[in-house]
Image (spheres, grey):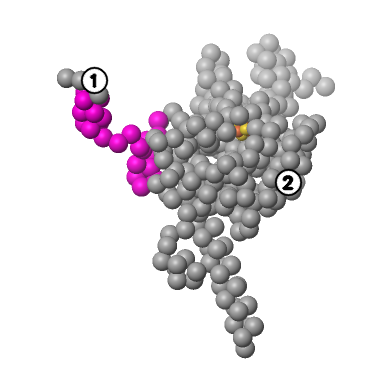
Amino acid sequence: MGLFSSITVRSPWLYRINAGSCNGCDVELATTAFIPRFDVERLGCKYCGSPRHADIVFITGPLTLRVRDKVLRVWQEIPEPKITMAIGICPISGGVFRGGHSIEGPLDRYIPVDVNVPGCPPRPQAIMEGVLLAKQLWLARLEEGEAGKNKAAHAAIS
Amino acid sequence: MPRFLKILVRNLLKGPATDPFPFQEAFTPDRLRGRVVLNPDLCLGCGICRHVCPGEAIRLEPDEGRTGYSFSIWHNTCALCGSCRHFCPTGAITLNADWHGAHPQTDKYRHAEHHFVPYLRCAGCGAPLRPLPPGIAARLYAHSPLDMTQVVKLCPDCRLTATAKREGERYGTTANPG
Ligand code: SF4
Ligand code: SF4
Ligand code: SF4
């Protein structure tokens, strides 16, 4: 496994959670940022349909009271190490919905966020930049994990 | 020629549909609303931008010693709607096309812009005075016969006194009859 993973390029799989978004950011994500015109698969990423397969998760929307528990449940199903991206100003700060009676956000009250892409909605290229940043963080985290495992193995032997 | 061959030739000539970004710079329209910027030299501190901002992205408050006011824009709650630019009376706040906003969580509260606009001191009494940019003063007082470069250096109270004195002189009474 060690040799195999050292000679292969890792490809993160992407997953999307809507936490009460107005749909603007979802449109940018699913139908604008990742259509052939921008082609996120060139960056070695791939959309997947199940949280259990995901590595990078995009969360849109201000985290409304109604979806909060469902979002948390789905987010917990994503295996570690995962990178959480807040897409749009809604999950980052609440945006134009900040202070609303049904708003439980900002997202980082509940979930450790790694990358923010502000905008309402952000333009597709900005999301791609965020994905590149997230991929870097994810690779670094994977390496850390591997190094940690190796250290543990060494400690067990000696 | 069969239709599919036509389409094939056309597509071959057109080249790939994929945008070269991120390997090349992305096409950005000049008027893209990417980021709010303030030109502190033009700002009056009127607060209209804060009043109309739907995301409450703008904070404007005097400092403790009342030497000026701080002006902050937090991009992480700015909806890029352009209302501030639309309503600003002086054109001090505007949006540029810089859309490179993605940042790691550690920079969440650093993704902002801060300015400090100092108050002027009233030439009469020394009270703090909001700055009035010369261009705006010229526009405001365009039809006045007075020398407004001096008047704008006074606070509202001193301006009242100056006007009273001037009018008094004009009508032949003294400003201080007592
Ligand atoms: S950031 Fe703007 S576009 Fe995106 S979900 Fe919120 S309100 Fe909609
Ligand atoms: S930026 Fe414009 S609207 Fe805002 S306080 Fe300054 S002058 Fe007023
Ligand atoms: S563009 Fe809109 S949301 Fe952003 S600072 Fe201006 S008024 Fe506020």
Residue B14 falls inside the magenta stretch: yes
For badge 1, the amino acid type reads: Arg
Pinpoint residue B45: horizontal percent, then vertical percent.
Answer: 64, 32
Residue A73 is marked as: 2
Q: Is residue B2 shown above or below B171?
A: below
- Farthest residue in the right direction? B178
In this rendering, would B108 be left or right of B27? right
Q: What is the quadrant of residue B140 in the picture?
A: top right
Q: How many marks?
A: 2
Nearer the observer, B115 or B133? B115
Pinpoint residue B30: horizontal percent, then vertical percent.
Answer: 40, 30
Residue B23 falls inside the magenta stretch: yes
Tell me if label 2 and label 1 are in contact, CB under 8 Å. no
Q: Chain of mark 1?
A: B
Pinpoint residue B3: horizontal percent, then vertical percent.
Answer: 23, 20
Answer few, some or many: residues within 10 Å of disc 2's Cα (few below 14, many 20 plus, some between 14 and 19): few
Nearer the observer, B162 or B9? B9
Q: Is residue B130 shown above or below B1?
A: below
Under circle 2, the secondary element is helix
The residue shown at (45%, 71%) is A3
Nearer the observer, A69 or B69? A69
Under circle 1, the secondary element is helix
Q: Which residues are magenta?
A: B5-29
The answer to whether any part of residue B61 appears in the image is no
For badge 2, the amino acid type reads: Arg
